[in-house]
């Protein structure tokens, strides 16, 4: 009984530590971006956001690495795992961030152009679909890189696109959670980045990892 209680206590405290430290490691670098978006006129600050946004991707990949490590081994070496994953995946994750930011920026600009045109009703849904697929595919690629840092980026893109679309219901749930979190973080940056960030990313990680099961190594694939 005491052993069971001790194991449960260690699991709970370990999870709490992982959540807290991951929030700190990701939230502090992301905070300036959130504040820039929430407190400035985007007409003047959009170019700064465009430069900064790609750097969120390596942070997310590092957070996903921490979640993978904790899920697979129960280890709570958050800082060490975060830094190791950041180093191993920084370049490909940054490429993912740059690509996603560029596509989403083009989509937003094009939506603004056709918003009041007669083609808007036809073109806007297509653009919105491109934006949604780009976002969820990019997140899935980051999870793939966190699980397999040596994976070839081109293959990770192809697999993530196919599997994220196939498991569209999980992808949709991830996007809903991220949308709710983003709105909360903009309104309450301290609470959003300090408490809700890691739980939101964990759900994205869990959904994407499950979607990626067909291409993950058997020893890394989570149990059904």
Image (spheres, rainbow, N blue to C red):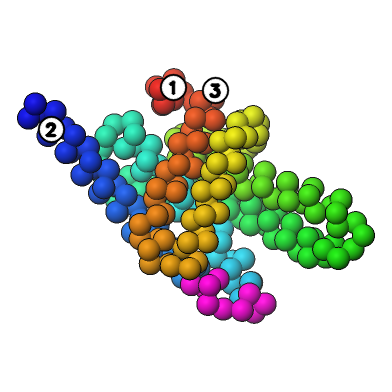
| Between discs 1 and 2, the one toward the N terminus | 2
**The C terminus - image quarter:** top left
The overriding secondary structure of the stretch rendered in magenta is helix
| Mark in the foreground, 3 or 1 | 1
Q: Is residue 33 magenta?
A: no
| Between discs 3 and 1, the one toward the N terminus | 3
Q: CA distance from mark 1 to mark 2?
A: 26 Å
- Label 3: how many residues lie within 10 Å, few (<14), some (14-19) or many (20+)? few
The dot on residue 4 is: none
Which residue is pictured at 17% across the width and 38% down the height? 10
In this view, the residue farthest toward the left is 2
Residue at mark 1: 224
Which residue is pictured at 87% across the width and 51% down the height? 122
The dot on residue 214 is: 3
Which segment did they paint magenta? 35-44
Find numbered disc 2 in the image and state the secondary structure of the residue it sits on: helix
Q: Are marks 2 and 3 in contact (CB under 8 Å)?
A: no
């Amino acid at each position: 009984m005491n052993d069971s209680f001790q194991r449960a206590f260690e699991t709970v405290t370990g999870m709490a530590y992982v959540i807290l430290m991951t929030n700190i490691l990701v939230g502090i670098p992301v905070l300036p971006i959130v504040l820039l978006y929430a407190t400035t006129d985007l007409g003047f600050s959009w170019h700064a956001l465009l430069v900064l946004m790609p750097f969120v991707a390596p942070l997310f990949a590092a957070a996903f690495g921490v979640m993978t490590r904790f899920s697979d081994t129960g280890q709570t070496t958050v800082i060490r795992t975060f830094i190791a994953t950041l180093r191993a995946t920084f370049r490909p994750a940054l490429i993912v961030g740059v690509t996603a930011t560029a596509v989403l920026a083009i989509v937003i600009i094009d939506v603004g152009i056709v918003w009041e045109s007669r083609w808007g009703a036809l073109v806007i849904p297509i653009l919105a679909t491109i934006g949604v697929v780009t976002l969820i595919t990019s997140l899935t690629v980051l999870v793939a890189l966190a699980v397999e840092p040596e994976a070839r980026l081109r293959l990770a893109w192809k697999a993530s696109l196919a599997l994220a679309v196939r498991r569209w219901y999980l992808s949709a749930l991830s996007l809903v959670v991220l949308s709710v979190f983003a709105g909360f973080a903009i309104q309450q940056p301290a609470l959003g980045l300090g408490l809700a960030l890691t739980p939101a990313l964990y759900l994205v990680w869990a959904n994407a990892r499950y979607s990626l099961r067909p291409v993950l190594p058997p020893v890394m694939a989570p149990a059904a």
